[in-house]
Amino acid sequence: MVRSTWRIGLHAVTAALAGLTTLAAVQVPAAAAPTTLRGLADARGVYFGTSSTVNEWNDAPYRSLAERETNMITVGNEMKWDATEPSPGRFDFGPADSLVAAAKAAGQRLRGHTLVWHNQTPGWVQELGTAELRQAMQNHIRTEVAHYRGQLYAWDVVNEAFEENGTLRQSFWQQKLGDGYIAEAFRAARAADPGAKLYYNDYNIEGIAAKSDGVYNLVRTLKQQGVPIDGVGMQAHLILGAVPDSMRQNIQRFVDLGVEVAITELDIRMPLPAEATKLAGQAADYTKVAQACLGVTGCVGITTWALSDKHSWVPSVFPGEGAALPFDENFRPKPAYNALWRAYGGTGGTRTCVATYAVIGQWWGGFQAEVRVTAGAAPITGWTVNWAFAEGQAITSSWNAAFATNGAAITARSLSYNGSLGSGGSTTFGFTGSWTAANSVPAVSCAA
Ligand code: G3I
């Protein structure tokens, strides 16, 4: 548990009370040390983020983890063209709006992803002739960016426009509109939201190589032409043991062009099964990436593509590979999490825990639930789990935790015999409760 500590400001007291016969000690609160990556990132003035789809956000343990550990959300799929304009001029922002509202309510900033891409763009767009395609692109950007005007930190305006050899990708965009479509897209986005940072985003541009050279030359040209580009997103879908040595130097050369850089979709995959040696290697790779970014003023933050291995895109696209993220399928922190923790300036072990809530029996009017608390990589000596019942549920009896209720808000604290958990160790507590109309699983958070 994090305790607020108090310091005595003796110098101030002595000065202020000079001349008084009785010297009183004045207590000033010391700033609490961050206990999460989010807190560390906030303190450092950078961000740590994750992508989230609506489905992921609706997975309660995922949501509570994302709210606890991240201060930036990238909308995973719901802002892409196939989601927002599935047929000409018919816009649907509903799913993306729900994520934007949820992230804002949790005090997180947002990255918009993505406006002009060759994937997840409906067939009707790809079939248009040149003039109509240009008009559709302008209209799409204008409408979507204006819809979120003032609400997003950044937009990935153009995504993955380069081939591996550093030439422009022969996408339908490039083939029909020519090279100039990129500048047109940025200009349209700036006109629709002058406050959002406008990014070019791509993969395999983390190290200095032909592809990143191509992007570098593009950005330099755009800047020379006065095209409004503010940032370069390096996706960083990386492979265990293959983080480029030139990553930091590469980030620096982009910053030197006058743009900011962000790591936008970090994951580091490995052949499955994951075991200790690979996880340790992965942690070293996460350290290398985080130090490359955070070591350059102008690299503004790191986003992982999902937070936990449960939601990663990797296994479905690279069969036999996975375990690419800082939390495992059960939301337990991996060595990669501790690597990020230290790279963001954390000390003394992470002292994190994760809680998962499960209804293990339900009958008319009543239910039994079990909450599992799991320590992170560092041992903990006490835990507190919080959640709110949104549907009027009430606890009738409980075991293995000290409960406090305040309206719908529930706090469960460890007892003398189950607060200490070793690295990765877990314990459970439970309760029976009553419910009426609905009994969905609430988002739970755990603090150690
Ligand atoms: O929505 C349909 C659903 O109706 C259908 O039943 C289901 C059956 O496969 O597919 C669903 O669509 C899937 C969609 O994700 C939503 O889950 C698509 O098949 C699937 O291809 C799509 O994958 C997304 C992928 O981009 C597409 O390119 C991943 O979720 C998303 O994580 C991934 O993200 C990309 C970034 O945008 C750009 N950089 C690379 C990154 C990883 O591929």
Image (tube, helix red, strand yellow):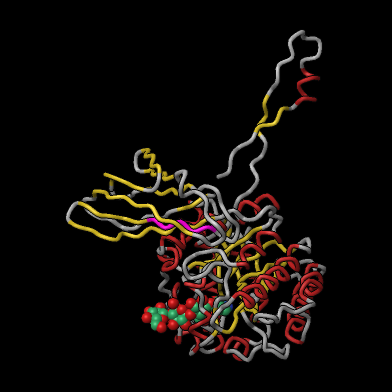
Q: Is residue 41 left or right of residue 209?
A: left
For this orientation, the residue located farthest to the left is 364
21 vs 55: above or below: above
Q: Picture coordinates of residue 53 (x, y %)? A: 46, 68
User: Is residue 235 in sight in this rendering?
Assistant: yes
For this orientation, the residue located farthest to the front is 417
Instruction: Verify whether residue 340 appears in magenta.
Output: no
Q: Residue at x 25, y 60 (%)?
A: 361
Residue 17, image quadrant: top right
Where are the magenta residues, as a range?
A: 371-375
243 vs 30: above or below: below
Q: Picture coordinates of residue 266 (x, y %)? A: 62, 72
Residue 94, image quadrant: bottom left
Please give the count of numbered marks on the rendered protein: 0
Q: Picture coordinates of residue 124 (x, y %)? A: 45, 86
Q: Residue at x 19, y 57 (%)?
A: 363
Comparing 88 with 357, the one in front is: 357
Comparing 226 with 46, the one in front is: 46
